[in-house]
Image (spheres, rainbow, N blue to C red):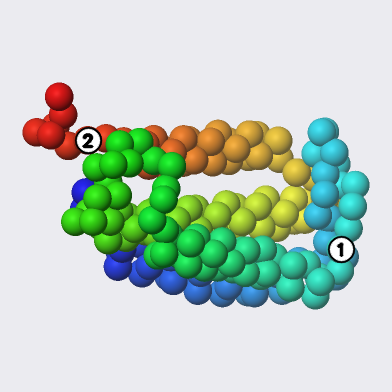
Amino acid sequence: MKSRHPISWLVFAALWLLAAILIHQTAADLPPRIAVHFDAAGQASSYMLRGDYRVFMLLFAGGLPALLVGIMTIAYSRATDLKIPNREYWLAPERLAATRAFLIAHAVWLGSMLIAIMCFVHWLVWEANQRQPPSLSNQSLLAGTLVVLLLISTWIATLMLAFRRPTKERR
């Protein structure tokens, strides 16, 4: 199992910074009263003040992923009894550090996906508020939802496949 630990942190930090810049800059283009919730037909059903929205989105796009990654990093860096496939093999003393590093990197990738998802949500809100009256594109929402499901499925599959016993060690 190879660890992509430094790359995952670099991607996470870059996305975190880009998300903060994107949200801060594009929120300025929004009207003073922003449509933030939409019904099934895409019509606005709830509003928020621009300043409150900016803070909310910055916290959700930056704070929530950082909190998630922080908690998972602390938990995995000390973990000795994990519920993973082939746990006897992957938690053996000679592999424990690499297993922990992989799990931390995988958590960081999850945090990066969460940042990207929140930026997509911000883009949907921004796009909806460019119309008068504000309305959400259900096609964009559906396409984004499918991409999110594909990303999460890939993340889960990668996690499960990582803990197979190496081919030369299988019986």
Per the image, the residue denoted by label 1 is 48
Q: Nearer the viewer, residue 150 or 43?
A: 150
- Tell me what residue is drawn at x 63 percent, y 34 percent: 142
Q: Secondary structure at mark 1?
A: strand
Q: Quadrant of residue 8?
A: bottom left
Give the side of residue 36 with respect to residue 78, left or right: right
Give the side of residue 87 with respect to residue 168, left or right: right
Please determine whether, in this image, residue 57 is positioned above or below residue 44: below
Q: Quadrant of residue 126?
A: bottom right
Find residue 57 and report its horizontal and vertical position in percent.
69, 65
Find residue 11 and report its horizontal and vertical position in percent.
38, 64
Q: Amino acid at mark 2?
A: Arg
**Can residue 16 be seen in the rendering of this structure?**
yes
Q: How far apart are labels 2 and 1 at the CA level?
A: 51 Å
Find residue 10 and report its horizontal and vertical position in percent.
36, 69
- Tell me what residue is drawn at x 56 percent, y 61 percent: 68
- Tell me what residue is drawn at x 41 percent, y 64 percent: 78
Q: Amino acid at mark 1?
A: Met
Residue 165, labelled with which disc?
A: 2
Task: Specify the quadrant that holds the C terminus.
Answer: top left
Q: Nearer the viewer, residue 40 or 136?
A: 40
Please determine whether, in this image, residue 150 is positioned above or below residue 101: above
Q: Secondary structure at mark 2?
A: loop
- Tell me what residue is drawn at x 30 percent, y 36 percent: 86
